[in-house]
Image (cartoon, rainbow, N blue to C red):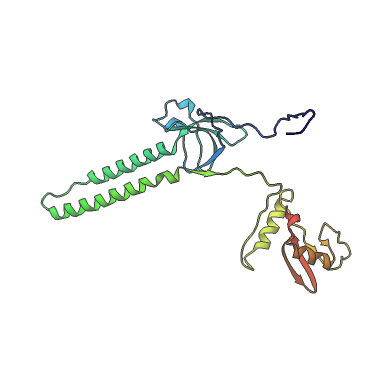
Amino acid sequence: RDARGSVTFKIVPTLRSVPPLTSQGLPQTEMYIKCMFNYDPVDDELIPCTQAGISFRMGQILQVINKEDANWWQVRKVSPEGLSGLVPSPELQEWRLTQTALENAKNDKHGHHHDSTNCSIFRKRKKDKEKQLAAKRALADDMDLSCYEEVMKVPAFRRNTLVLLGAHGVGRRHIKNTLIGGNPDRYAYPIPHTTRSQRRGEENGHHYFFVEQDEMLRDIASNQYLEYGGHEGAMYGTKLDTIR
């Protein structure tokens, strides 16, 4: 309160993009979904405009742009083309699958002719069909879980890592050598660190990283190694920084 003098405010543009707003004026958060079924608007009789729809395949990732409509969501493909369009909402797809399941159950129920003289068999079959119908209804109630799966967008890793898991002798080394030999520009093995002496013809940083034992022990104590071990009196290990 007792401060005197001029105060200058410096306004700089933010590096974060402003999220779009919903019809209620609230910030619209990014939402990504993984498709759990195949879809083509050409084959959809419910879509209001076929040209407005967008097709996708199972496993494809879509960004949800607008989901205010109960039946149709506006999405964008997460691809270089970035095509956008309408897809059925989970509620609509659940209703569609439910109707299909109930129609199939209805056809199964009325698709057989029974002998009117054998009422006991008829009643038994009727009960069996009703049980099947109830089971299909219960199955249809859970079908919304198989329409879309919400996923999260994560920043790309600087270097992708392929980990081969398996017991000793199952062929991990053979798989590793095959991948590296067939695609040397794409695959490479992380160069290990070792405390053994450098041999003739070996280049530091090419075959191994040669370090002193005290340095390696300090790095192990500070959790800088993914794995390490000993062989013939020397220590070997793979550093996390080598993989990153």
Residue nearest the observer in this picture, 6 or 73: 6
The answer, for residue 217, to whether it is visible in the render is yes
Relative to residue 88, is residue 228 depicted above or below?
Answer: below
Q: How many marks?
A: 0
Rendering quarter of residue 217: bottom right
Residue nearest the observer in this picture, 190 or 238: 238
Residue 199 as seen in the image, left or right of residue 47 = right
The residue positioned 77% from the left and 66% from the top of the image is 236
Q: Residue furthest front?
A: 2
Rendering quarter of residue 224: bottom right
Q: Residue furthest right?
A: 200
Where residue 183 appears, as percent x and y from the top left, is 71, 50
Relative to residue 17, is residue 208 depicted above or below?
Answer: below
Relative to residue 16, is residue 221 depicted above or below?
Answer: below
Where residue 92 appears, as percent x and y from the top left, is 40, 36
Where residue 43 appears, as percent x and y from the top left, is 42, 32
Where residue 82 appears, as percent x and y from the top left, is 59, 32
The residue positioned 42% from the left and 29% from the top of the image is 47
Residue 172 as seen in the image, left or right of residue 53 = right
Residue nearest the observer in this picture, 179 or 98: 98
The residue positioned 36% from the left and 48% from the top of the image is 139
Relative to residue 181, is residue 211 depicted above or below?
Answer: below
The answer, for residue 61, to whether it is visible in the render is no
Which quadrant is home to the N terminus?
Answer: top right
Q: Residue furthest left?
A: 117
